[in-house]
Image: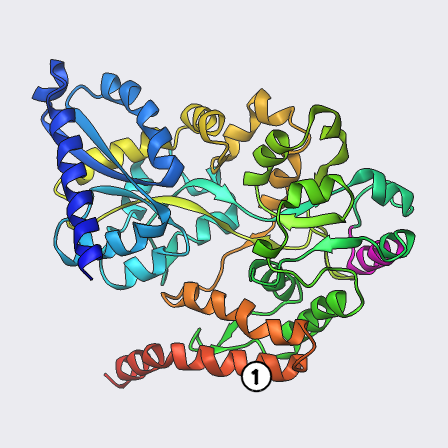
């Protein structure tokens, strides 16, 4: 606790020093009528500073102070700021956090502002991503950058298995994996599915039509037929030796293992576009390509993936809502989104930004544009972050052969039901009124 208090004191002092330094820059900034406090998370909080000068030149009455917060501390700091009455005016929120902050009354509804905006409209965004910013029918965030999962694969290994392109159905996918494993003589695997990640199995469950939660998002639906079928298929990949039973931290350097053919496929996200380009040698760049996800047989391709990313949200307690909205609109313009992509590698939320030649010519980013047209938001309940971690934890015994899949899913549903007990109680009281 003492270390925690000292850390908070250090952060507060650093923030005060940064604010003082910013205020003492001199020039027109010191006389601006409006000051917007923007909290950016991780690398994005650093990069966004490079976009501020152009905004301030176009808005001489507004000054933007950017505070960068590590992702590991962001959730707690945002909650503390809200409870303590000192939140930012505008903040970057992971879109799975929006239901939680909306539920506690921290966020300003934005639909009225979007309706009169000259540059923003719902149709400019990918449908599944836009939905992540809504909670109980109300819009609380504007997508800033997007995240989803696609298939990274070795074209040469798939070609040797008889596939000139990435499989588009589960049956073809499984067939390709079996051929890859057989061709290696059991010395290599077909796909990497880290056992401590929840995203891959959740995506497969969504593809099979699972709602993940049931009864108005008050109970788990993981033991139901749709998710159970996906989980059996998923666990079968480990049981049959097609995927190594390893967590991400046990693997060492996955890029090196990919290059040396230890595995041929990996379901992962857009940050790995940059990582593959940085970590593989120039002569190894031909070894990788991306593709939208395969779909269950009888389901339209591509199979759905998850809708992730970060959004821009205005805090209800802000006294500078109009100025904060002006900065959010600026960050959402296609030209600025394109520049932000160049600086950070984060994929643009605006569809128009994808027409920029840099992205349009990038064959390896193209799979993400296709996949983003088929993404689904996670259940919009404040407890989702905790539930997601339970998915990986409770399925690992099944992956390791210590528990049957139905039993593992029953344990998962039981834990999820306990997490959602308060939600059921609140909804029951509301219906009695």
Q: Residues within 10 Å of mark 1 (few under 14, many from 20)?
A: some
Left or right: 433 as drawn, with respect to 355: left
Q: Is residue 426 above or below residue 289?
A: below
Residue sitting nearer the eye, 202 or 393: 393
Residue sitting nearer the eye, 342 or 146: 342
Magenta region, main secondary structure: helix
Q: Position of residue 126 (x, y in %)?
A: 52, 44
Q: Secondary structure at mark 1?
A: helix
Q: Quadrant of the C terminus?
A: bottom left
Residue sitting nearer the eye, 236 or 258: 258
* Residue 174, magenta (yes or no): yes
Q: Residue at x 38, y 36 (%)?
A: 44
Q: Is residue 37 above or below residue 179?
A: above
Q: Residue at x 47, y 26 (%)?
A: 338
Residue 74 seen in the current view: yes
Choose top left, top right, bottom left or bottom right for residue 75: bottom left
Q: Is residue 189 above or below residue 61?
A: below
Q: Position of residue 212 (x, y in %)?
A: 54, 70
Q: Quadrant of the N terminus?
A: bottom left
Q: Residue at x 27, y 86 (%)?
A: 432
Choose top left, top right, bottom left or bottom right for residue 336: top left
Left or right: 43 as drawn, with respect to 254: left
Residue position for label 1: 410
Magenta-colored span: 168-179
């Amino acid at each position: 606790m003492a270390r925690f208090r000292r850390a908070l004191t250090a952060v507060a002092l650093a923030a005060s020093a940064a604010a003082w330094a910013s205020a003492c820059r001199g020039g027109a900034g010191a006389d601006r009528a409006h000051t917007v406090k923007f909290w950016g998370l991780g690398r994005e909080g650093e990069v966004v500073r490079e976009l501020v000068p152009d905004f301030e030149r176009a808005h001489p009455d507004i000054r933007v102070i950017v505070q960068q917060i590590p992702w590991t501390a962001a959730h707690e700091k945002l909650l503390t700021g809200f409870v303590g009455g000192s939140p930012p005016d505008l903040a970057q929120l992971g879109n799975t956090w929006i239901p939680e902050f909306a539920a506690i009354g921290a966020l300003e509804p934005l639909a009225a502002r979007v309706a009169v905006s000259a540059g923003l409209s719902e149709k400019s965004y990918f449908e599944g991503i836009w939905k992540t910013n809504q909670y109980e029918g109300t819009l609380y965030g504007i997508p800033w950058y997007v995240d989803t999962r696609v298939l990274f694969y070795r074209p040469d290994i798939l070609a040797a298995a008889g596939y000139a392109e990435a499989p588009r159905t589960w049956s073809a996918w499984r067939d390709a994996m079996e051929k890859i494993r057989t061709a290696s003589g059991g010395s290599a695997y077909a796909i990497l599915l880290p056992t401590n990640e929840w995203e891959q199995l959740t995506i497969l469950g969504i593809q099979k039509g699972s709602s993940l939660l049931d009864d108005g998002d008050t109970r788990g639906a993981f033991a139901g037929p749709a998710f159970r079928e996906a989980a059996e298929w998923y666990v079968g990949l480990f049981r049959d030796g097609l995927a190594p039973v390893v967590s991400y931290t046990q693997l060492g350097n996955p890029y090196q293992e990919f290059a040396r053919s230890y595995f041929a496929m990996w379901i992962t996200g857009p940050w790995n576009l940059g990582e593959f380009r940085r970590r593989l040698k120039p002569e190894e760049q031909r070894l990788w390509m991306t593709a939208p996800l395969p779909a269950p047989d009888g389901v339209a391709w591509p199979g759905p993936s998850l809708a992730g990313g970060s959004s821009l949200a205005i805090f209800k307690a802000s006294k500078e809502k109009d100025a904060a909205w002006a900065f959010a609109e600026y960050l959402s313009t296609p030209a600025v989104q394109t520049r932000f992509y160049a600086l950070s590698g984060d994929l643009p939320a605006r569809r128009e930004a994808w027409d920029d030649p840099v992205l349009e010519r990038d064959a390896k980013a193209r799979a993400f544009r296709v996949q983003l047209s088929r993404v689904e938001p996670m259940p919009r309940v404040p407890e989702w972050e905790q539930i997601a971690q339970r998915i990986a934890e409770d399925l690992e015994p099944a992956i390791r052969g210590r528990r049957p899949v139905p039993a593992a899913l029953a344990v998962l549903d039981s834990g999820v039901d306990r997490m959602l007990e308060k939600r059921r109680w609140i909804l029951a009281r509301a219906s009695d009124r």
